[in-house]
Image (cartoon, rainbow, N blue to C red):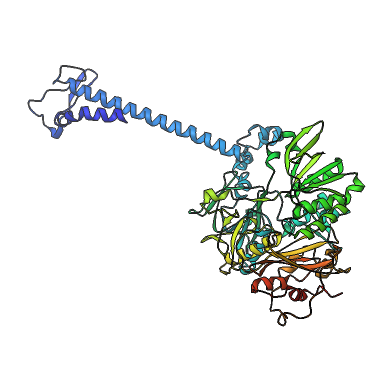
């Protein structure tokens, strides 16, 4: 293009001369003069098709030569451009065909599998190219009116809530796990007490009440295919498994998946849950240590640990919280039959020392020991190494433990990787996405479950990591995504079972550093998790508890009347109620082997009143009834 422009600039002064003169052409040695308007202009020299002195016929010759050269150059440029574009187009088509698994990417495949068909019927082979990629392209819907990021309890609860309020809603759940939404509590509870040798495959278990169920919320038939979500009549819920959202464009209302696919949305829920924490000493250790360490969270973690418990001779659990204590009791119960040594270590003085008052924590530790577990309290890990075929755990006080496998149960880190790309705020105190009382992070973005740091209108800003909170917050987020605009007022509960005979339920802020008041009574045969599920009809107690409405408490609370019996002095805490106080107001309650009374506890916290005699408040839970 630059050559043509230069030629034009050079020849522009000759244009008047060319227009004024006639052209003489030589054909077969004869001259034929062609005159414009049939007359010969006087005093004008003839232009010859040869070079000559400047000012003569040579200038027209130069003009024609240069114009011809420009035309030739332009033709070459156009030819090369078209040829290059065609080559790039064919190369791009080949790449796309290869990525989608088209026959164009593997031309030899049809010949190897069906040589006769390929030779005799070439037409079907050519028509198969555009048909084959269709499922791969439509596997990821281009748009989802309701997009739920994360495939856990909060997402499933939100999906049900959205569909309840908007029956025609089209909901897409995107999860990086390979499984459909499932409940996590049985992974550390009931599944370990199953008699079915194929429990790792069936993932079905008997609840304490004897009824059997699956850990999956719904079978696969409940969901619609992601490919059909946009077209299915009356909408539905689709689950896109094995896909991770890696980028979020808040302004453009779209997300990007790990495979490069993009999905636009109208409203979005972030329910990414959390990632199990690990000890830094383990992270800094060798690869051999990492291979023999389990961070317990998902179905594959349960399968791996269950397999390890049958193959190895010793397992050490680091952590004294809910998960660590539950796994310790579960493995301890089968230790005698398997010839397995089970060790539990933690930095606190007793099991669940951060939650329970010291006297109850000590009692719980003795209970865990009776299950066949070797408990090491006040144990701070200094170093972990691998030598002579075993792991060696060295503690800061000089103690050392040799074991075959480690389970690190030291808490959860909220999964907030999307915060950076989405420009969402992370709470500096509690972690997680910072949201308002309606669980909103933006006008069309909500957060629920473990990853949400929400504002509790009664207890202030909080972040909760329990199954029931995932149910409650997911359900509320789903309602608000459909226009409810409700604040988070419902106090979610959590529970832990140390086998079928000892369990507790808790609500509110349960922190052993707070002042506590405990009221206990003698337990009966019906004061166990097993009996509780027989009465409620479900092994996941929160499913019944969270549906109950905290109505008004019948009658006023009497103050200063006959006192309740004092707690047992022989450390026989059969059943009871523990109140956690802040500024003399009850902010948390633990129901120890007291079940199906959570609406009462929820109402007490919601009222936020100061009580002069908590012994009288404890009577509301009927703990003194036989």
Pinpoint residue 169: horizontal percent, then vertical percent: 60, 64
Q: Residue farthest to the right?
A: 337
Task: Pick whichever, 245 or 170, lies toward us.
Answer: 245
Pinpoint residue 153: horizontal percent, then vertical percent: 69, 58
Q: Give the total number of marks visible in the rendering.
A: 0
Of the 4 image quadrants, the one containing the C terminus is bottom right
Side of 64 where 231 appears, left or right: right
Q: Residue farthest to the bottom?
A: 555
Is any part of residue 25 visible from this angle?
no
Which residue is found at the position 69% from the left and 79% from the top?
A: 552
Q: Residue farthest to the left?
A: 43
Side of 16 where 476 appears, left or right: right
Q: Is residue 101 above or below residue 163?
A: above
Image quadrant in which you'd find residue 573 = bottom right
Image quadrant in which you'd find residue 462 = bottom right
Is any part of residue 208 visible from this angle?
yes
Task: Pick whichever, 350 or 464, lies toward us.
Answer: 350
Pinpoint residue 64: horizontal percent, then vertical percent: 24, 25
Pinpoint residue 113: horizontal percent, then vertical percent: 71, 35
Of the 4 image quadrants, the one containing the N terminus is top left
Side of 92 where 580 appears, left or right: right
Task: Pick whichever, 58 or 305, lies toward us.
Answer: 305
Task: Pick whichever, 123 or 318, lies toward us.
Answer: 318
Image quadrant in which you'd find residue 584 = bottom right
Which residue is found at the position 71% from the left and 68% from the top?
A: 546
Side of 155 where 56 appears, left or right: left
């Amino acid at each position: 293009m630059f050559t043509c422009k230069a030629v034009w600039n050079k020849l522009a002064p000759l244009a008047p001369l060319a227009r004024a003169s006639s052209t003489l052409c030589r054909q077969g040695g004869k001259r034929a003069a062609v005159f414009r308007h049939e007359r010969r202009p006087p005093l004008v020299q003839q232009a010859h098709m040869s070079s000559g002195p400047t000012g003569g016929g040579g200038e027209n010759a130069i003009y024609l030569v240069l114009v011809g050269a420009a035309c030739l150059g332009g033709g070459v440029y156009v030819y090369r451009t078209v040829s290059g574009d065609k080559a790039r187009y064919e190369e791009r088509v080949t790449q796309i065909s290869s990525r989608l698994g088209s026959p164009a990417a593997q031309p030899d495949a049809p010949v190897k599998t069906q040589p006769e068909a390929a030779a005799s019927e070439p037409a079907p082979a050519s028509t198969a190219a555009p048909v084959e990629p269709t499922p791969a392209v439509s596997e990821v819907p281009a748009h989802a009116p309701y997009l739920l990021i994360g495939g856990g309890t909060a997402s499933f609860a939100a999906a049900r809530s959205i569909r309840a309020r908007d029956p025609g809603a089209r909901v897409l759940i995107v999860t990086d796990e390979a499984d459909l939404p499932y409940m996590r509590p049985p992974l550390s509870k009931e599944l370990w007490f199953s008699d079915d040798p194929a429990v790792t495959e069936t993932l079905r278990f008997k609840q304490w009440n004897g009824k059997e169920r699956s850990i999956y919320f719904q079978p696969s038939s409940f969901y619609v295919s992601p490919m059909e979500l946009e077209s299915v009549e009356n909408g539905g819920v689709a689950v896109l498994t094995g896909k991770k959202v890696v980028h979020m464009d808040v302004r453009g209302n779209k997300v990007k998946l790990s495979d490069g696919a993009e999905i636009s949305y109208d409203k979005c829920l972030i329910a990414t849950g959390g990632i199990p924490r690990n000890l830094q000493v383990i992270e800094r250790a060798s690869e051999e240590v990492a291979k023999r360490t389990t961070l317990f969270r998902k179905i594959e973690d349960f399968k791996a640990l269950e397999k390890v418990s049958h193959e190895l001779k010793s397992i050490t659990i680091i952590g004294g919280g809910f998960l660590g204590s539950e796994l310790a009791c579960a493995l301890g119960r089968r230790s005698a039959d398997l010839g397995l040594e089970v060790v539990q270590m933690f930095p606190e003085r007793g099991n669940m020392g951060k939650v329970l008052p010291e006297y109850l924590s000590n009692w719980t530790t003795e209970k865990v020991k009776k299950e066949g577990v070797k408990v090491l309290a006040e144990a701070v890990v200094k170093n972990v190494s691998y030598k002579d075929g075993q792991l060696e755990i060295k503690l800061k006080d000089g103690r050392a433990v040799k074991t075959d496998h480690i389970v690190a149960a030291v808490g959860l880190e909220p999964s907030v990787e999307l915060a950076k790309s989405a420009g969402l705020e992370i709470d500096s105190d509690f972690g997680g996405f910072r949201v308002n009382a309606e669980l909103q992070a933006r006008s069309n973005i909500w957060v629920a479950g473990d990853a949400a740091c929400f504002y509790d209108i009664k207890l202030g800003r909080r972040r909760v990591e329990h199954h029931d909170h995932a149910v409650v917050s997911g359900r509320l987020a789903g309602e608000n995504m459909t226009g409810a605009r409700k604040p988070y007022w419902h106090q979610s509960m959590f529970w832990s079972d140390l086998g079928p005979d000892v369990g507790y339920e808790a609500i509110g802020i349960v922190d052993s550093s707070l002042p506590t008041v405990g009221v206990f009574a003698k337990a009966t045969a019906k004061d166990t998790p097993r009996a509780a599920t027989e009465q409620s009809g479900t092994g996941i107690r929160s499913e019944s508890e969270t549906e109950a409405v905290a109505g008004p408490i019948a009658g006023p609370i009497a103050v200063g009347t006959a006192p309740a019996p004092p707690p047992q002095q022989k450390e026989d805490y059969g059943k009871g109620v523990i109140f956690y106080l802040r500024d003399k107001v009850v902010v948390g309650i633990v129901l120890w082997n007291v079940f199906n009374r959570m609406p009462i506890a929820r109402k007490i916290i919601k009222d936020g009143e100061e009580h002069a005699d908590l012994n009288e408040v404890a009577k509301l839970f009927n703990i003194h009834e036989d």
